[in-house]
Amino acid sequence: MQTTIAGNWIELTGALLFGLAVLHTFSAKYFEHLAHTQTAHAGLWHLLGEVETVFGFWAFVLLVFMAAALGWGATSQYLDDRRFVEPMFVFVIMVISASRPILQLVSDAVAKLGLAVPLPAATARYFLALSVVPLLGSFVTEPAAMTLAALMLLETIFSRQASSALKYGTLGVLFVNVSIGGTLTHFAAPPVLMVAAKWGWDTAFVFSTFGWKAAIAVFANASILTFLFRREIAAKTRADARGNRSRAPAAFVLVNLAILAGVVAFNHDPEAFMGLFLLFLGLAEAYKRHHDRLILREGLMVAFFLAGLVVLGGQQRWWLQAVLSNLDETALFYGAAALTAITDNATLTYLGSMVDGVSQDFKYALVAGAVAGGGLTVIANAPNPAGFAILKNSFDEQSINPFWLFLAALPPTIVAILCFRAVPKAAVEFFDLQVWLRWFESLDRGFLFLLILPFVVAVVGLWSERISSRNGKRPEHD
């Protein structure tokens, strides 16, 4: 009986800490402000202001609480039961994908493909980085595609003093397109990978069910954004982003490509892909002249973020599974898209796959909704922190506002929703007030509060920031 009570307390505490982590994600900019005003502890405030540290920090708090309540033996067993393969894999694939040989290969391929696009070379590069590269994630995995696309966009547009509207618009489309762009195969997108084996899905099924719709949405999102900002893109972008860097020899590129292919092939076996990663590091050290700085720090920060999400996410099963099992097909689709904004979409589909006796409509709605909503926040999809870490320094105050990211990702998310729900039926359904009312009525009130609270905090934070900015600009009177 005491074990049951303790277990309930751990679950409730885990849910509370998870909610605090979500709120912390939306409030990270406040801690950055404290780092500049409370200089005595600037290091601590700066650490808490790093979005990549948020879930790792609160996961540590959870482990301390569990150790005090249950003892270190039970806490250690809890950690042993978690799978940290994904954080390890994302770290490895980020570092290898961001290396000069791989980036050079992808950039050359994009340049060749750009010759067939009826756009100026610089604009074509921008368009392809938001469309073809995210779809490439279906083969080299989504984290690799996110890393490659973010680095290409960093050199093409983010380092060119672009407007905030273009930066946030690009980031929103990038996150959404990478989330849905991995659904051409059954092994590249984390939310698909989590259910493919259990439900017997292969690449042919995934492509015919999700992939072709995702491709339409990816090209639609990239085309709309490129058209809307065509003048600024033409003025700010540059086609050749390699600058004066020396080129790696073809043989060296092929060796690194083979290592990357091996890491992708053994993405479930950390012993194998970590061995290949050590081989890559050895080659990078031996041939420094063919490499730029490896993004080891950025990769480790992202891995820390994802590991914290794994630890905290393990305590969310009790309420997430109950919510998913009580929704009908339509409510589940929109509910999954909304839930993904505050939970990792792979965790969402994994928990949904544990519900027994579900229909094919349930499976489709769960996965389609999860990938459609994967660009709304930095925690919605595992590759998002990678793009966040690479691009954040290009924004004002070297920080990405979560509220503006959400607003920027909302239009491409709606495009993805319409494609997955099969236009024109979805267009009518999406604007049907009764459908939305039925969905809200089906939600647990506690969950609804948790869903709305982060966005309320984001709005209040934005309002407070504007007030502080206005007060700071007021002229001083003698």
Image: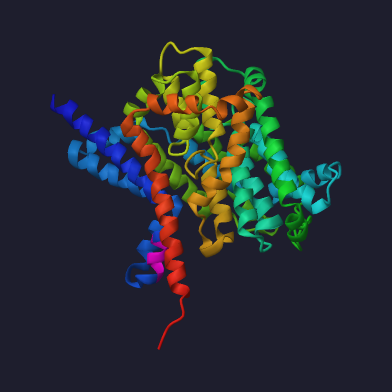
Q: Quadrant of the C terminus?
A: bottom left
Q: In which image quadrant can residue 68 be found?
A: top left
Q: Is residue 407 magenta?
A: no
What range is drawn magenta here? 31-36
Q: Position of residue 153 (x, y in %)?
A: 67, 52
Residue 4 in sight from this viewpoint: yes
Secondary structure mostly taken by the magenta-highlighted segment of the chain: helix
Q: Position of residue 34 (x, y in %)?
A: 37, 65
Q: 453 left or right of 198?
A: left
Residue 141 in sight from this viewpoint: no
User: Could you say which is closer to the camera, residue 162 or residue 425?
Assistant: 425
- Asked if 104 appears above or below 188 in the picture, the reply is below
- Asked if 30 appears above or below 430 in the picture, the reply is below
Q: 58 left or right of 370?
A: left
Q: Quadrant of the N terminus?
A: top left
- For the point 46% across and 36% down, the residue is 344
Q: Position of residue 156 (x, y in %)?
A: 71, 55
Q: Position of residue 237 (x, y in %)?
A: 74, 57
- For the point 51% across and 30% down, the residue is 370
- For the point 47% across and 38% down, the residue is 341
